[in-house]
Image: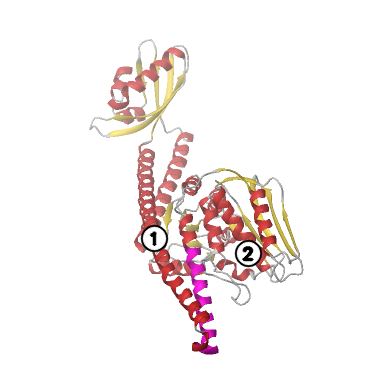
Amino acid sequence: MSQPARILVVEDESIVAFNLQQRLSMLGYEVPAIAVSGQESLELVERTRPDLVLMDIHIQGEEDGIEVAARLQQSHAIPVIYLTAYSEDSTLERARKTRPYGYLLKPFSERELHATIQMAFERHRLENELIDSRRLLQQALDAASLGVLELDKATTAVTASPRTADLIGVPQGQPIKLTDLLSRVDSDERTAITTKLYDCLSDLKQFSEEFRVLTEDQTPRWIRLDAGHASDRRVTGVVQDISERKQSELRLKLLNEGLEKLVAERTGQLRQSLKELEAFSYSVAHDLRAPVRAIIGYSEMLLHEHPNNVGEDGQQLLQRIAASGQRMGALIDALLHMARLNQVPMQLRRVDISAIAGEIATQLMASEPQRVAQVRVSPRLEAMADPTLVHSLLDNLMRNAWKFSARSDITRIDVGARTISGETIFFVRDNGCGFDMASADRLFGPFQRLHRDDEYAGTGIGLTIVQRIVMRHGGRVWAFSEPGLGAAFHFTLSA
C-alpha cells in the first residue's frame, strides 16, 4: 500500500490550523507538523521533507508566506499552495510571481481543498516528467542518437539520416528536395518556417526552430531543427523529436489555466460574499443604535427624575444599565467604523506620517495635562498611502500606547521607522504594562482583549482596525512585548 502524501501546514491561527489538520487527515493525507512562522516552516521542511506545503500568507515573523514560499522555491522543489482570506490585487500579484501550485481563498470546502491538492500533485508530477524528458533528451544528444540532415544550397537537395526520415515521415533513402521537407510542415506554420529557413540560407544565419510536421498517416509530430552553415554550399543540422515534451507543456498549460480560472471564480465569489456580509453587518449595527440609546436615555431619566422611587439599590442597577448601554454603543460605533474601512475607496498619495502622529500626540497630552509624558515622533516619516486610513491606524496605535502607559511614572511613546533590505518598517513603541507574547496570536482578533475591563477600558476592536488598514495597503503588522516592559507595534505600508 502506498504511503499517504505528507503535507506541512503553515498557519499561525491555532484553531484554523487544527481544523485544517483534521480535514486533511479525513481526506487521507498525513500532516507531519504545523508551523506558525516563516523560520519555523523552513526548519520543518528540512526535518520532515513534506510532499506539499499549505502556506497561509499572513503568518508570524518578519517574513510573510509569500516571502517564505519564494525561499522554498530556491532551496526545495516542493509544491506550495497559498491559503488566505484576502484577495487584493497587490497580494495576488506578489503570490503569482512565486509560481504557486494553487491559491485557496478562505473559507473553502473540503472538495475544493482536495481538488486543489490533487491538481498541485498532478502539476508537480508533470513538471518532474518534463525535467526527466529534458534529461533524457540531453543523454540522447550525448549519445548522438539524433536525426541528421544535410542541405545542398545550390540544388536544394536534402540528405536525411534514417532517424530524420522517420521523424519527417518520408521513406528512408528516398531523395528529397527542400520543398518536400517544407511540405511536411503543418500548414499553420509553413509560411513562417519557410521564410526563416530561406533567410538562413541567404544570410548565413543559424536556424533553430520548433514546429509540427505531418507524417503519412497525418499524425502531427513536434520536431526541433537546429542547423547552421558547414560551408558556402552546405547546411547541416540535427533533428529531434520533442512531441512528448510539447504534450507535457500543453497539459501543464491547461492545468495552469484551470488553476487560474478556479482562482478567478473563487475570488469573484469571495468578493461578492464580503460585500453582502459588510452590508449586513452595517445594517445590523446601524439598527441597533436606536434601542441602545433608548435604554441609556430611559435609565438616566429614572436615575435623575425618580431617584427616591427606585431606592439606592435601584440607582446602582440603573447606573450599571446605563454603563453597559454606553459600552454597547461604543462597540456598535467601532463595528460601523470597521465596516466602513472596506467600503471607502482608497485615495493613495504621499502621506506625512510625522505630521499626523504629532497632531495625535498633541491631542493625547491635552486630554490629560496632569500626566507626565514624553511623546517623540521622528521627522520626515512618509509613505504612499491613504491619509484617512493612516490617521485611523496611528490614532488606534498611539491611543493604545497612551492608555496602557497610564500607570507608568513617566509615559514614553516613540513613533519612528527603520529600513531593512529596502523595506520601510514603521513602529509605535511605549513603556506601558506590555503583554505576554504567548497571547500575541489573539492581538488582532475582534473583541480579543488581553486585560480586564476594570484595568483598562476598551472595545477590543482597535487592533483589528489597524490590521485591516495595513492589509488594505498590502502590508503586514506584528508586535513585540514583555509584561511590564512596554510594547512595540511594527507595520509596513506597501501600497
Q: Is residue 91 left or right of residue 162?
A: right
Given residues 372 and 9, the one toward you in this image is 372
Residue 332 on the magenta span: yes
Residue of label 2: 400
Quarter of the N terminus within the rendering = bottom left
Could you tell me residue 150's position as x and y percent?
Answer: 40, 20
> Based on the displayed image, in which of its 4 quarters is residue 375 positioned?
bottom right
Nearer the observer, disc 2 or disc 1?
A: 2
Q: Is residue 168 magenta?
A: no
Residue at 49% of width from left, 62% of height from top? 9
Crowding around mark 1 (Cα neighbors within 10 Å: few <14, some 14 to 19, many 20+) is few
The residues tagged by marks 2 and 1 sit, at their Cα atoms, a distance apart of 28 Å
Depth check, front residue: 83 or 281:
281
Q: Bounds of the magenta span?
A: 310-335
The earlier-in-sequence mark between 2 and 1 is: 1
**x and y, in percent, of residue 416 in the image:** 69, 52
Q: Quadrant of residue 247?
A: top left
Residue projecting furthest to the left: 217
Relative vertical location of residue 470 with respect to residue 33 in this rendering, above or below = above
Q: Amino acid at mark 2?
A: Asn
Where residue 244 appears, as percent x and y from the top left, is 36, 40
